[in-house]
Amino acid sequence: MQRQLIFSILAILFSVCDATAQETRKPPPNVVLIVSDDQAWTDYGFMEHPQIKTPRLDRLARESLVYRRGYVTSSLCCPSLASLITGKYPHQHMIANNDPPGGQKDKAAFAAGREMMSRFMDAQPTLPRLLTQAGYLTLQTGKWWQGDFTRGGFTHGMTKGQRHGDAGLDIGRKTMQPIYDFVAEAKKEDKPFLVWYAPMLPHSPHNPPARLFEKYKSLTKSEHVARYWAMCEFFDETCGQLLDHLEEQKLADNTIVIYVTDNGWIQDPDKPQYAPKSKQSQYDGGLRTPIMVRWPGKIAPKMSDTPISSLDILPTVLDALGLKRPADLPGLNLLDEAAVAKRETVFGECFTHDSRDLQNPAASLRWRWLVRGDWKLIVPAIQNESNGRVELYDLQSDPQENKNLAESQPERVAQLRQALDLWWRGEVQP
């Protein structure tokens, strides 16, 4: 009897040791970053849009930690994406604008300016660069501004160097095959991977499949709105294809999926362009986005209304993978509930479309802003064209930012302005 008991105890110990060894041998998690392009924070089923259907992203939301009040650093795509991939503010990584001074008028000057912006990216320990150093294969697809995909530290990619992303823009709109091929290669080499899926969707041109346009055109009087709504569902379908592929390849359980938008969009009902208070603006219509993190078995699904930043994505991934963070990252780990609860304020900045001075981002500054709880403060730069009007909004009662409370609440403005100025001068960490 005693011998049997000893054997039973030994069997249990060996079982525990074997389970521990298997856990130790488990491969590092893969990472898939989904970045929508020009989409309002309201324009999803899970965000309760009354018409737009996004069944695959709704399912992702049900399976994820969802921060409904995420913010990008800037409401312009190039600096926003650069912040996402570096984990830093535009004034820190120096890519604050879409284009160099003078825009695209002078081809030689434009090319030289874009090369300087790409060199700014070269200097940064980007997410793909850090993961590549850790043994990951890393793929760029879709929107990419900073030269060849290798300039961001990717091992694989579609973009060869033109503005926006050249061949990379085929992803989603035309094909998903480059991602499937990359995943197959990573599996063959037995390596973990990062996928940057940033299709130019639902970004204009709003040319959705006819079946989706037919679905939405009877729901609104505006053809332009119907086309945009249809593009949102078209984008959702491509996300479903990507997520389905992870499941088919039996990779979903060991893949961290993160979702964010580069900047917002409010469709002008009368023209094929964005309306005021959205893209390029200082308002939530241009800055706010849901941010989702899914990691089956590791992250419990939950909805949160705590304001967070797109800068938090990079440190979240690094901490989840057990990799060392660069020392100067201002973001935090979204899986650290205590850290998220402790932070009071989210900051950001908006710049001109074309740079005024690539070496001095402050020369192109339009607005600085912060969100603290339900309050949002917007402070214009001295040179800004909006007559220097400071704006204060109660986002709980006025989510569309229609009633400026700055004059009626000078003490609150002063308190928040002090925090904004300290952040801008780099005297405190947010």
Image: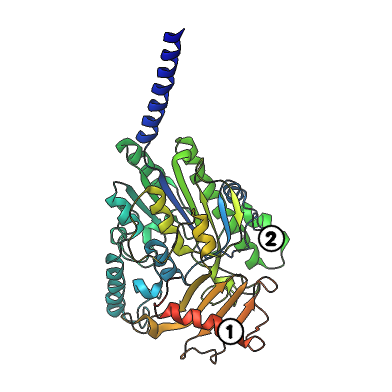
Q: Could you say which quadrant of the image residue 356 lies in? A: bottom left
Say what secondary structure mark 2 lies in: helix
Q: Residue at x 70, y 72 (%)?
A: 397
Identity of the amino acid at label 2? Lys
**Which residue is labeled 1 in the image?**
413
Question: Residue 338 got which mark?
Answer: none
Is 269 situated left or right of 186 in this image? right
Local packing at callout 1 (Cα closer than 10 Å; few below 14, some 14-19, many 20+) is many
Nearer the camera: disc 1 or disc 2 = 1
Q: Residue furthest front?
A: 2
Residue at position x 64%, y 89% in the image: 407
Q: Position of residue 138 (x, y in %)?
A: 34, 50
Residue drawn at the location 34% of the way across and 82% of the way down:
360
Q: Is residue 233 visible?
A: yes
Above/below status of 214 relative to 96: above
Structural crowding at the residue carrying mark 2, measured as other residues with C-alpha within 10 Å and reported as few (<14), some (14–19) or many (≥20): some
Quick one: which residue is furthest to the top in this view?
Answer: 1
Asked if marks 1 and 2 touch (Cβ < 8 Å), the reply is no
Q: Measured along the vertical axis of the image, is residue 29 above or below residue 21?
A: below
Q: Is residue 353 visible?
A: no
Q: Measured from the top left, where is residue 392 in percent x and y?
A: 61, 81
Q: Indicate the secondary structure of the residue bearing disc 1.
A: helix
**Which residue in the structure is indicated by mark 2?**
217
Q: In 3D space, how far apart are the residues under numbered discs 1 and 2 (Cα atoms)?
A: 44 Å
**In front: 201, or 421?**
421
The amino acid sitting under disc 1 is Val
The mark nearer the N terminus, 1 or 2, is 2
Q: Is 397 left or right of 237, judged from the image as shown?
A: right
The number of numbered badges drawn on the structure is 2
